[in-house]
Image (cartoon, rainbow, N blue to C red):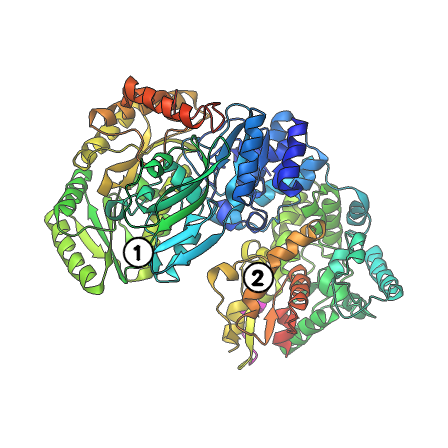
Amino acid sequence: MTDWPTELERCVRCGSCRAVCPVFNISLQENETARGRLARLERSLQSGRFSRSDWEAFSRCLQCGRCVDVCKSAVPVPDLIRWAKRQCGGSSGISAMIAEEILPHPARLRKVAQNARRLLGWLGQATPRTSGLRLRFALPYLNRRRYIPCIPEKSFLEQVRDRPAQGTQRLALFTGCGPGLLFPEIGSAVDTVLAKLNLVAAVPNQPCCGLPAWGWGAESAARESVQSWLRAFPEKAYDTVLGVCASCTAHLQNDLSPLLAGTPQAAAAQSAAGQIEDFVVWLYRQEWRPDLKGIKVAVHVPCHLRRGVRGGDKITPLLIESRADVIDLPPDAASACCGLGGSFGVTNAQLSLAIGEKKIKAMLAPRPDVIVTSCTGCLIQLRELAERANASIPIQHPAVLLAG
Amino acid sequence: MSGLIADFTALLGADAVLTDPGDLAAYAADYKTKGRSPLAVALPTTAAHVQNLVRFCVKHRTALIPRGAGSGAAGGAVPESPAVVVDLSRMNKILRIDRDELLVDAQPGVVTLDLQNAVEREGLFYPPDPASSDVSTLGGNAATNAGGLRAVKYGVTADWIAVLEVVLADGEIIRAGVRTRKGVVGYDLLHLFIGSEGTLGIITNLTLRLMPLPPARATLLAFFRELEQAGQAVLAVLRSPVVPAAMEIMDAVSLEAVRGKTGDLIPPGCSTVLIDLDGTETEVAAGSELLINILKEAKADEVRRAPTSNEAKALWSARRNVSRALFELRPQKVAEDVTVPVTRVVELMTGVARLAQEYGLLHACYGHAGDGNLHVNLLYDPQNQHETAQARAAREKVFRLTLDLGGTLSGEHGVGLAKRPFLSWEQGPALIELQRRLKQTFDPLNLLNPGKIFP
């Protein structure tokens, strides 16, 4: 964030955000609109003090960015919220410990995932219902009879550890924690698709992208993650780094460079941010199209994909060109958020599910054969929501559908 | 105060009372006016909640400020002295749509657009249409007698309210108005509450009138090289037997602000008259033909009919967005909803242009040409002290000009805090005193939205 307070002053308080904010539309209180949160921010700035209750209030923003879409002054609300959370001293407690001590370190991250598998086994909860990312933050979650993940016997990252690239393009895969540690079928599907193009992507040992820490307001942990990421994917080592999870990709494309601005890695970060590309956006440029005729698909476009990823949503056109029957959702439903918002779903579980219920209802109504989405956070949330709605429908990353 | 808050919590439940200073900051302002944070915010869900709140606050001599969406432009819902804000957003149920009597019962926190959409799904139509309908609420619309784009044919909010349920300052709940189509029993208190800006009672329920949804619509667009010609064209249309459902004028600066929305639909550098017609297919077809001829005779450079409903939607959406979009040109603006006799609209617009030039300000005029209600905007940068002072001074000149033209200082925003100092410019002392006595009768302790309207 460069010229900080001017961006706050750009809010003219028209209240347009009330019409679109998923949180406000559940809680119906002005302090939970973008306009209301900015008023809190202004007050804290004027008093020169950011408190724990400020952090908690700012944490009730999904950072989905729908308010920015309707804002005539284009106030970058999610950026301001993250900035504000950092002023509150970022995070504390177990979540901060995880964000700072585990996520930036590939080896520790793998170890935690493996141990989590054992732990869950003991708890008798290692069912196929999956919600791994949440474990990163909130152990109290385990008490809530919520989705508990099934950590795979061997994660995708373990399966293909240190694999080099092959083929005419020097490709590398950045899986993100979801596909890398929890959902090996996504990584395998990406491999299958690439094999059809006679390509093998390198899979270097890799950390978390740092988005959870960034969203949480833990700036130094976020910086440490991207530094570690940069070591895993050095500048110019590959032609393209394919990001499998849209949210991780958006974070790296947009925040990698600003996070390392003014550090010795600034130039490398900028160039690396230009090399990472969303897997589906990349795939859409290739000539290959599978035949998905007769498959009725509902696409959930993640907020990060809609607003953050270079190239935007290419899932929809790719599926249409692959002759899938892509359901045309009403505009409101199409742009609706799943409600997870990373750590938001942990700190505000009930609210998160209430927001997501609207989305899953709209997606299930036209009776799709499959729901696809390219962010693993969204994927987990939608699976939980579908389960709660007693709908047995496959919810997958688009790569799985494309691989056939 | 802490005792008060504990009692509120007992009255409403813990999740319906806000006391954290950071939360309260959100209630210190509306669209245009900044005040101070309230003592607390209550989020009632029933009329009984409101009744209990009022009784409690009266007992403790604490002021109450009802608030809808906070999209008002005059500070009507903004605290300037210690008060509890009653945020009615959670009273957002549409209770019953009566297709035969053409009535709908709704709570005050229902968003205007949600009501419009709900009745349209039943083939019905709620005509009042403030430009902020995606945000504004019915209670706020009633409390300010909101106008909007369709007033030229269908009138304002007041014309579509049958009954208001109001909690009075003594805690009594009354229902003013009739559900029948006529009714002359007693004083017309319904219309006293409408537009009273929360100073006489808190609206807890509305019965609104509806009409069958006109099956056909058309949007016409006329471009004029000179603003004056556009103004003359508006008068020519008003003299014709065809009453447009909306007739808006936008000057070149307003159009520039929303160009992103209109794309190639509107050429740059001209003034535009945007007209909506509704009715049966035959009425709309015949009306369009007649108006196209009238506009051409009135020296329109070009007259177009929006070829598809999507283009018509884009044009109207652009028009709705002018107010917010002008902030893209300058960070702040004086925006006044002055209203003059329709025959004086051109004089007002040219007068504003002259003032803007004199004070060195960028200006934009747009609005409801069909009913003489213009939105006069003087754009400025608040960081620039000179420009800010110029804008303030020019604002008063706009008010003088409006009154000289036989107009009124507010067509639809209300007085609130923003126009309070100017009330006596428009109304004589006896009239103001009579209103003060009315306020005294309704609210002897001056606890309902105190300080609003009267200087």
Choose between B248 and B245: the one closer to the eye: B245
Instruction: Identify the residue at image location x=52%, y=43%.
Output: B47
Locate the C terminus of chain A by quadrant. Answer: bottom right
- Counting from the top left corner in percent of width and height, residue B65 is at 50, 32
Q: Is residue A144 above or below residue B250?
A: below
Residue at far top of view = B429
Question: In the image, which residues are magenta?
Answer: A282-291
Q: Is residue B295 above or below residue B29?
A: below
Residue type (three-letter) at the residue carrying disc 2: Lys
Secondary structure beneath label 2:
helix
Magenta span has A283?
Answer: yes
> Residue A122: in sight, yes or no?
yes
Disc 1: host chain: B
Choose between B222 and A256: the one closer to the eye: B222
Residue type (three-letter) at the residue carrying disc 1: Met
Choose between B146 and A290: the one closer to the eye: B146
Q: Given this view, does label 2 or label 1 mark the residue nearer the observer? A: 1
Q: Quadrant of residue A187?
A: bottom right
Instruction: Identify the residue at image location x=49%, y=23%.
Output: B445
- Counting from the top left corner in percent of width and height, residue B51 is at 53, 37
Reading the image, the residue beneath label 1 is B211
Q: Is residue B116 above or below residue A400?
A: above
Query: How many neighbours does mark 1 have within 10 angstroms: few (below 14), some (14-19), or many (20 or more)?
Result: some
> Residue B417: in sight, yes or no?
no
* Side of A330 where A177 appears, left or right: right
Query: How many neighbours does mark 2 have within 10 angstroms: few (below 14), some (14-19), or many (20 or more)?
Result: many
Disc 2: host chain: A
- Counting from the top left corner in percent of width and height, residue B204 is at 47, 42
- Counting from the top left corner in percent of width and height, residue B158 is at 32, 42
Q: Quadrant of residue B102?
A: bottom left
- Image disc number at residue A359: 2
Look at the magenta stretch and give its main secondary structure. Answer: loop
